[in-house]
Amino acid sequence: MQTVKMVVTGPFNSGKTEFIRSVSEIDVVSTERKISSDSERVKDQTTVAMDFGRITVDDNLVLYLFGTPGQRRFDFMWEILSEGMLGFIVMVDSTRPETFREARNILETFRAYAPTPYVVVANKQDCKDAWDLEDMRIALRLDGRVKFLPCVATDKESVKNALLELLYSILEEMEKGEG
Amino acid sequence: MALKGNLRDFSITQLLNLINVAQKTGTLVIEGPSEEIWVCFRDGKLAFARDGQEDGSLASVLFREKKISAAQFRAIKERAGAMSDKELGLLLINANYISQQDILASLQNYFVGIVNRLFTWVEGLFRFENNMMPPDDKITVRISLENLIIDGSRRVREWEQLQDEIPSLDMALKFTDRPGTNLRNVNLSVEEWRVVSYINPKNSIRQIAKTTNKSELEIRRIVYGLLQAGLVELIRPAGMPVPVPQGRPALPQASKDEQKSLINRIIGRIRSI
């Protein structure tokens, strides 16, 4: 049995766990804990080690989705999780501009770990406070060539689209490598 | 027993505070990764500072502070190279080249600049040599540490933010190809233009800083401004090896066709979910 993995990363409360939950065929193995810091009390629980979802491709191949912890104090897990990844997805909460800088830093950190393809996903685009994609692209200082996709992590089709775009990028990289 | 330790454990802010409160007299010697700095205090006040890598002579300080011209600086070095700072200071004042206030203000700026640089150091062995003062022929000043500490604390916060934004000076810069961006329409200072003139995917930010004689804080400030204005973007310098991922490979060791087939199988599966 072959296994491959992709990593879903992003700042605290950007929707990584929901994203994986939307497409995983197993209940997401989540290591969530109650939040202790008042400053981070946007939600009750957060991921402290990793989330873990699975998609069985066929009898011989399984895709694992790993979600990283969003809080900086657990960033020692990031490098471990990034080892051997096919590519990664950076999730950004479109309604919380105060997290954009952190998202940018996380993106740079993961790019340094491995030069694998990635896409950036603007989550919570269904919320009325969500920033426009183009404004977010500028705020996040994303190059025009970086795939930046609207997303609602609780919507399966939206999550599928993000995963497919990442896979297309991986294919493109392979073809470039051949050329 | 001399006060000694590492800035990692005892910050420069804490050290200055201690020297200020205890009204210490002596010299704080700090060994950084590539330079050594001496800062002298008298009764808890800043008296003198020297960076081991720089020419800290009075002539050099006055030249840096633009109080004397390059030609005057050369002439002083040739004709009065052996003169002490105090003798040179008196000579310049008596010859009406410069006032006593100008000399003291220039030295104060220079010493404060050296101390400010220390606020960006996160590591470095330090020791405080009680009662050790600069040679008698050096001109000393008397600057209270309170304002330096407050100003330095602000710099620490700014430094932390700039480090977040520009984590590595080994990256290079390139001009963005965003339509409508035109450098000619932007108001840049002379120093910013100097940096801009060296922007090239081949030059790392560190190299630009060295060429333009900027400290890490100064170059980060300028690059941060250019990044925020959307004029430039960070890239890996041309020729810099792309980091090879450690650990197990992402894809099984197979031919390109097999790897593509594997990705296509995943694509097919995800479409069908």
Image (cartoon, coloured by chain):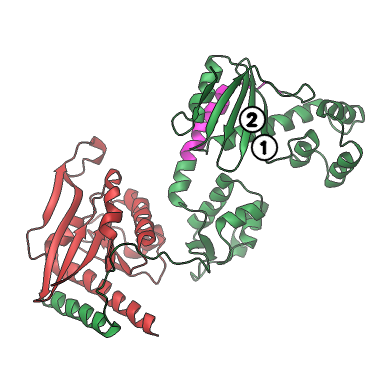
Residue to which mark 1 is pinned? B52
Q: Is residue B231 visible?
A: no
Asked if the residues shown at circle 2 and circle 1 are in contact, with their CB atoms under 8 angstroms apart, the answer is yes
Q: In the image shown, does B181 or B256 lie closer to the viewer?
A: B256
Give coordinates of residue B258: x percent, y percent: 24, 83
Residue at 20% across / 36% down in the picture?
A36
Residue at 21% across / 66% down in the picture?
A5
Chain assignment, label 2? B
Principal secondary structure, stretch drawn in magenta: helix
Q: Indicate left or right for A139 with A2 as reference.
A: right
Residue to which mark 2 is pinned? B38
Number of residues whose C-alpha sits closer than 10 Å to that of mark 1, classed few (under 14), some (14–19) or many (20 or more):
few
Give coordinates of residue B27: x percent, y percent: 63, 23
Tell me, by letter, which chain the rendering colours green: B
Looking at the picture, does residue A112 appear above or below residue B239? above
Q: In the image shown, does B93 or B212 lie closer to the viewer?
A: B212
Q: Which residues are magenta?
A: B141-158
Looking at the picture, does residue B244 appear above or below residue B45? below
Looking at the picture, does residue B158 appear above or below residue B142? below
The disc labelled 2 sits on which kind of residue?
A: Trp
Q: Is residue B5 magenta?
A: no
**Does dot 1 land on a helix, a strand or a loop?**
loop
Residue at 77% across / 21% down in the picture?
B136
Q: Is residue B152 magenta?
A: yes
Number of residues whose C-alpha sits closer than 10 Å to that of mark 2, classed few (under 14), some (14–19) or many (20 or more):
many
Residue at 8% across / 76% down in the picture?
A59
Chain A visual colour? red
Q: Indicate left or right for A161 with B8 as reference.
A: left
**Mark closest to the chain's N terminus, 2 or 1:** 2
Q: Indicate left or right for A1 with A89 as reference.
A: left
**Does dot 2 land on a helix, a strand or a loop?**
strand
